[in-house]
Image (cartoon, grey):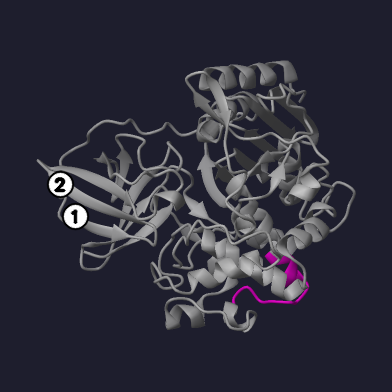
């Protein structure tokens, strides 16, 4: 087929204008036909237009890159993803002895490690930034034992990054560049400022009464790089990365980047998600979901200065990526673009999103209580048969925008123990839902807001 770039660009421009996005990119490949559609400007101060080569912060989509680096180590026989992490990291420790002894790289990459999300602190610009951040996790209680539940967290990716550093003798940034970006032919990607300076780079923006201001600081710290704080890519390079999974691990020039076995492993479902807003399952690195009977893989990323989404569809030999520099509208922009790409170009119908309206009366008793992570507390209450959740950040400076005052929303029941948020006030992606994990005692043991799990404490 021939992709009409005029129509695709129009979809992107219209979405950006209506959502208040300064600059964005869309890239797409179907059966080898590759297109890129840049729109808007990369910096309101310079007024420079976004090009296909502009780098955007991609946030947590970086986690799939980190997982690919770990799988390269497995390909080389340097680690076994089903052996305890402690075998490969001298002195490794978590806030629970059993978890320390049993957590594996597979647990880390499939978001089943049970580790707390960890603190959002800057551990400096030095080559020890990742190691220092991982050491901070050692003092946190775990959310669950490894393998027990799904619980997305950034700390797992940090530990994966430290595995890469320890076994290669390189920093995560060096390994990313030399072992993945360069071999895969990703020329419009960089994680360090001293490399980003040689590219056009989109800076983050936030809307104000007078227009837009820059988002500062640029990053939450180099230590969070493996989880998504520092890597910048063009949407085109994200699609080229996605094509590795369409080509059984080969780059465009035939270079072997991942083994066929690792590609298959990374696309094997490891756990079902209690929530369904982002995905219905998690693999070894990417998430997975089904639209119109077609299996899709990918990842969404958010950082204060940028947002990205990468999806690839092996069955249709297709991959699509979007990037934006007004991060809090990134998921809505991706949604608008994907509505067009999947329905009009790929012939795939997306599921209808659940309506935000009260459902039938439910038994609220199993859910009422307090749930906690290292940096936030959720309090679940009930009134007249309706369920409410309030979020309080323990550390407003490190909570991704959650303020010091509690925010509350009603939970509208969907199916099972899953709910939709009446208001988009809990942070994260505004399209997320919520769910409770209920134990054998018919009482919830965990609350999952979007994809982040919190353990019951009261």
Q: Which residue is mark 2?
A: 382
Q: Earlier in the sequence, mark 2 or mark 1?
A: 1
**Label 2: which secondary element:** strand
76 relative to 437 in the view: left or right: right
The stretch drawn in magenta includes residue 132: no
When asked about the image quadrant of residue 8, the answer is top right
**Pick the front one: 196 or 351:** 196
Instruction: Please give the name of the residue rendered at 66% of the width and 76% of the height, measured from the top-left corner.
Output: 80
Judging depth in this view, the residue of 273 and 301 nearest the camera is: 301
Q: Position of residue 91 (x, y in %)?
A: 58, 83
Question: Can you give x and y, in whole percent of width and height, for residue 119 in the image?
Answer: 48, 60
Q: Residue at x 46, y 78 (%)?
A: 99
Task: State which quadrant residue 370 falls in.
Answer: bottom left
Seen in the picture, residue 446 relative to 431 is either above or below; the reply is below
Image quarter in which the N terminus is found: top right
> Is 449 rendered above or below residue 342?
below
Side of 337 relative to 394 (left or right): right
Which residue is at 75% across, 70% downward? 75
User: Where residue 405 appears, x then y in whole percent?
Assistant: 29, 44
Q: What is the number of callouts on the image? A: 2
Q: Residue 71 colored magenta?
A: yes
Q: Which mark is residue 390?
A: none
Residue 124 is situated, as x and y percent measured from the top left of the image, at 63, 60
Q: Which residues are magenta?
A: 70-82
């Amino acid at each position: 087929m021939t992709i009409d770039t005029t129509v695709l660009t129009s979809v992107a421009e219209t979405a950006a204008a209506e959502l208040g996005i300064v600059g964005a990119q869309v890239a797409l490949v179907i059966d080898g036909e590759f297109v890129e559609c840049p729109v808007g400007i990369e910096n309101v101060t310079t007024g420079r237009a976004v090009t296909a080569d502009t780098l955007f912060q991609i946030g947590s989509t970086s986690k799939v890159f980190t997982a690919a680096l770990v799988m390269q180590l497995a390909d080389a026989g340097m680690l076994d993803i089903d052996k305890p992490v402690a075998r490969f990291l001298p002195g490794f420790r978590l806030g629970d002895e059993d978890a320390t002894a049993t957590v594996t790289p597979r647990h880390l990459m499939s978001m089943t490690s049970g580790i707390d999300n960890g603190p959002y602190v800057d551990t400096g610009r030095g080559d020890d930034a990742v190691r220092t951040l991982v050491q901070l996790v050692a003092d946190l209680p775990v959310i669950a034992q490894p393998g027990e539940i799904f619980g997305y967290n950034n700390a797992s990716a940090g530990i994966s990054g430290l595995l890469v550093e320890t076994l290669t003798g390189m920093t995560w940034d060096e390994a990313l560049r030399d072992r993945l970006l360069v071999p895969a032919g990703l020329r419009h990607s960089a994680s360090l400022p001293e490399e980003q300076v040689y590219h056009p780079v989109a800076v983050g923006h936030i809307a104000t009464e007078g227009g837009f201001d820059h988002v500062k600081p640029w990053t939450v710290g180099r230590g969070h790089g493996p989880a998504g704080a520092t890597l910048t890519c063009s949407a085109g390079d994200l699609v080229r990365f996605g094509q590795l999974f369409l080509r059984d691990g080969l780059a465009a020039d035939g270079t072997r980047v991942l083994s066929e076995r690792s590609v298959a492993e990374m696309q094997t479902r490891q756990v079902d998600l209690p929530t369904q807003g982002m995905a219905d399952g998690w693999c070894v690195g990417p998430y997975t979901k089904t639209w119109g009977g077609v299996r899709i893989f990918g990842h969404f990323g958010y950082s204060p200065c940028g947002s990205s989404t990468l999806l690839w569809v092996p069955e249709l030999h297709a991959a699509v990526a979007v990037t934006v520099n007004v991060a809090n509208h990134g998921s809505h922009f991706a949604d608008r673009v994907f509505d067009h790409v999947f329905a009009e170009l790929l012939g795939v119908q997306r599921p209808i999103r659940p309506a935000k309206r009260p459902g039938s009366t439910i038994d609220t008793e199993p859910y009422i209580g307090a749930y906690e992570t290292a940096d936030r507390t959720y309090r679940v209450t009930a009134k007249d048969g309706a369920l409410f959740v309030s979020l309080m950040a323990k550390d407003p400076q490190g909570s991704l925008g959650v303020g010091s005052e509690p925010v509350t929303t009603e939970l509208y029941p969907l199916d099972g123990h899953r709910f939709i948020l009446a208001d988009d006030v809990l942070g994260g992606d505004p399209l997320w839902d919520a769910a409770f994990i209920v134990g054998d005692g018919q009482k919830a043991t965990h609350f999952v807001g979007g994809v982040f799990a919190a353990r019951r404490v009261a």
